[in-house]
Image (spheres, helix red, strand yellow):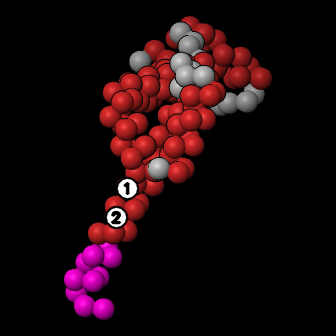
């Protein structure tokens, strides 16, 4: 193989990979969209399987803007859920509650007085 054949192979593989990524993105968008009924989704899938390049181009032109909006909405919802989980898991104790729980651990012998002092200073900071 000469240089141009290798270059052409690299370019062809790149475009094939880009097309497959687009195809998977379209399928994911189709099945996540709640506004379309099952028959319309089936028609899109049928045409994506039998006329893939033209159908992918038509889909991106016809539904590209709403596809991006749905993707951004899903990302926003996912970020909100992650933030809510972190807040729920981390807990929201105020300084008095933190000192009280540290004092109870000290009384039970779970921590030393030095550790209690550090926890108290951290809670008050």
Query: Magenta region, mostly helix, strand or loop?
Result: helix
Camera-side residue: 77 or 27?
Answer: 27
Q: Which residue is mark 2?
A: 14
Q: Which residue is mark 1?
A: 18
Q: Within the image, what quadrant is residue 90 found in?
A: top right
Q: Residue at x 56, y 13 (%)?
A: 92
Q: Residue 31 at what x, y percent from top left?
A: 58, 33
State the SS at label 1: helix
User: Is residue 81 in the magenta section?
Assistant: no
Task: Please rate how many residues cluster around mark 2, counting C-alpha atoms within 10 Å: few if below 14, some from 14 to 19, many from 20.
Answer: few
Answer with left or right where residue 86 lies relative to residue 16: right
Q: Is residue 116 visible?
A: no
Q: Position of residue 58 (x, y in %)?
A: 37, 38
Quarter where residue 12 is shown: bottom left
Circles 1, 2 touching at the beta carbon (< 8 Å): yes
Part of the protein shown in magenta: 1-10
Query: Which residue extends farthest bottom?
Result: 1
The answer to whether residue 84 is above or below residue 7 is above
């Amino acid at each position: 193989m000469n240089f141009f054949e290798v270059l052409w192979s690299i370019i062809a593989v790149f475009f094939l990979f880009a097309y497959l990524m687009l195809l998977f993105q379209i399928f994911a968008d189709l099945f996540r969209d709640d506004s379309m009924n099952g028959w319309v989704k089936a028609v899109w899938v049928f045409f994506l399987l039998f006329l893939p390049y033209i159908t992918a181009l038509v889909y991106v032109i016809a539904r590209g803007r709403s596809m991006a909006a749905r993707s951004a909405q899903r990302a926003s919802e996912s970020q909100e859920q992650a933030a809510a989980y972190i807040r729920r898991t981390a807990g929201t104790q105020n300084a008095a509650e933190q000192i009280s729980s540290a004092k109870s651990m000290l009384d039970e012998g779970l921590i030393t007085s030095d550790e209690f002092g550090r926890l108290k200073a951290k809670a008050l900071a």
